[in-house]
Amino acid sequence: MTRLRAIAALPALLALAGCGNSLMPTPVGLDARGADPFAVTTDACRGSQVRVFVASNRSVNGGSRPAEYFGNDRDQRLRVGTLDVRIGHGHLPWDRLAEVSRQDGRDGSPPIELAKVDDFGPVWSASVESRAVGNPGGVDAAVRDRFTEAVDRALAESGSRELYIFVHGFNTSVDENAAVSASMFHYLGRAGAFIQFEWPSRDSVWSYQADKAAASASIRTFRHMLQYLGTRTRAERVHVIAHSAGAPIAMSAIHELRLMRAMEPAAKVREALRLGRLVMVAPDMDLDDFRDCVADGATEVPERTTLYVSSRDKALDFSAWMAGFARLGQPMQELTPKRVEFLEDDANVDVVDVVGAEDRVGSWLGHSYFHEDPWVSTDVLLTLATGAHPLDRGLQRDGERKVFAFGKQYPDRARAAAIKILNGKQPAATAATPAAAPAPAPDRAAGGIAP
């Protein structure tokens, strides 16, 4: 990675500002020839409006427009509530929305709009008021219980007790993140409940260092939120997907939770937190910081940790140049076998190189592929929804680099895998019980709130 390549990413980063929000492109495995993600969607969850929960340590502007309600400054308190996100113009009939959502090769339309913010209020007082490790500060029981009841009601109405948390990345706004959250939850069949963790990104390409600092300052808040969700709600499992600068928030919080219970087996900590799968896409995290997490057993706490990396990620080129050290989400050309040999032990980690997908349909910046690339979004959604082994999700093993990759035949493989997995013909595989599947020949062209 050179300084020139890092600087070359700046124009594309700037070009992202002001783009309208729309439903993510149809994941290839969930199109009309693949699995129907809406077969599990209950009547109560059908419609053009998607409800996403929000937990935020952003400041509040209180603007009249929902997209302007939250600010970009830090707040020591955690506010909770709901976001109502509308897909399409007016009230798009459900049958039409479901049909459009599965169109093969569809572009980013229909539009998505953040229609309403319902702020329940801050669930605890400023964290600096309490020095206790296990207590975030004074708890507002009324706000906490209202949020708990709302989450539990959503789980019941959807017929699923799976809870998903999305941790966004650098240079993003609440309405952008709401579009991503609503899109992902939509393609998860709206089964379970979905929480958008809103840490205070300044929504400016020029505020990278400020965003990284704000992300670091959000780790304790996220840690307490994980403790709360695992002990107060009726969620069976809590899954986390973290993007870019949001990845260190999720990983570091789990790391701290592991150290706090270092004398207990990882499985017991996982059970107490009800922690499911951890997915980190384009993680903007120092490689050695992640090595420390692995060494301390943090990656043994989730059922499985999945990393998505790319050689086309120019945003991480810029980040690595700024930091002076390799980032976790950089390409395997940078993350040499010697640098990642710590993953060859029982680290409970899968690495997926997305270059085979990005070389065909990826964006120029190559950083938001988890919702922009129909191939990658398929695998991310199958990972979150089922925890199936990578080989059973349609990926191929690249033995030389000890990673999983997308082959040329991935679309057909993904459709078949999605139909098989989502139809319940195959149980989800965990680290303890990997799916027994023959490895296809690698395609070398693929390149608490206190309880």
Image: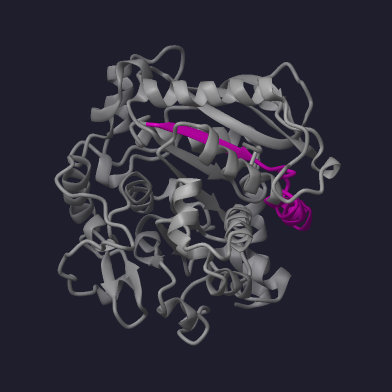
Observer able to see residue 378: yes
Residue at the extreme front: 263
Residue 82, percent across and down?
Answer: 58, 24
Determine the residue positioned at 57% across, 74% down: 291
Which is more toward the observer, 102 or 3? 102
Observer able to see residue 240: no
Which is more toward the observer, 121 or 365? 121
Residue at the extreme right: 129
Which is more toward the observer, 324 or 409? 324
Q: Is residue 136 above or below residue 159?
A: below
| Range drawn in magenta | 192-219
Determine the residue positioned at 16% across, 47% down: 420
Q: Image quadrant for the C terminus?
A: top right
Residue 271 inside the magenta-drawn segment: no
Residue 220, percent across and down?
Answer: 70, 50
Q: Image quadrant for the N terminus?
A: bottom right
- State which quadrant residue 75 falls in: top right
Q: How many marks overall?
A: 0
Residue 265, percent across and down?
Answer: 47, 63
Residue 208 inside the magenta-drawn segment: yes
Identify the colour scheme used. Answer: one colour
Is residue 58 found left or right of 11 in the rendered image?
right
Is residue 209 found left or right of 241 in the rendered image?
right
Determine the residue positioned at 67% across, 20% down: 142
Determine the residue positioned at 66% across, 65% down: 319
Which is more toward the observer, 23 or 434? 434
Residue 418, percent across and down?
Answer: 22, 46
Q: Is residue 43 above or below residue 163?
A: above
Q: Is residue 247 above or below residue 355?
A: above
